[in-house]
Amino acid sequence: MKLFSRRKRKLHMGKYPMEKLKRVPKTTTFISDNVPRVPKRANFFNRAALGDLGDKAKRERPRFVGKLPFARSMGRVCQAHLPMHKGEPLDDEGTAAG
């Protein structure tokens, strides 16, 4: 027996009944300014390569992409795009911010 039945729910409405939530005029979640902003490039693969996750992860990191031939080829394609991702972000007008 399911707790929530979606049998009569329309597909475009989504999985959860978000329309039943009470709306409030002011946000209830506060995120302070001292939360570190981490770029997408600082994911766990890069952190493992730098040794942040320990010696074993640093040792095994170069082997990870090469386990399958397709993964190895995609790794090279992704590495080719890295220079395009570096630089200053653009603002709303499309010019470099800063």
Image (tube, grey):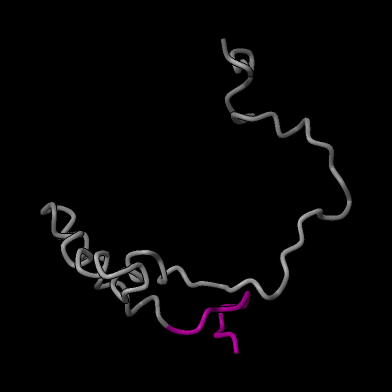
Which residue is depicted at the point 63% across and 13% down? 8
> Residue placed farthest to the bottom in the image?
98
Front-most of residues 14 and 12: 14
Front-most of residues 64 and 96: 64
Report the quarter where the C terminus lies: bottom right
Above or below: residue 87 compared with residue 85: below
> Residue placed farthest to the top in the image?
1
Front-most of residues 43 and 86: 43
Above or below: residue 63 compared with residue 15: below
Report the quarter where the N terminus lies: top right
Please provide percent x and percent y for residue 4. 63, 18
Instruction: Tell me where residue 52 sits by quadrant.
Output: bottom left
Residue 96 in magenta? yes
> Residue placed farthest to the left in the image?
69
Which residue is depicted at the point 18% across and 67% down? 62
Which residue is depicted at the point 45% across and 68% down? 40
Give the total number of marks visible in the rendering: 0
Instruction: Tell me where residue 63 sits by quadrant.
Output: bottom left
> Residue placed farthest to the right in the image?
25
Q: What stretch is highlighted in magenta?
A: 87-98
Instruction: Tell me where residue 6 sits by quadrant.
Output: top right
Please provide percent x and percent y for residue 45. 32, 65
Above or below: residue 10 compared with residue 58: above
Asked if residue 18 lies left or right of residue 82, the reply is right
Residue 75 in magenta? no
Name the dominant secondary structure of the magenta segment: loop
Please provide percent x and percent y for residue 48. 31, 68
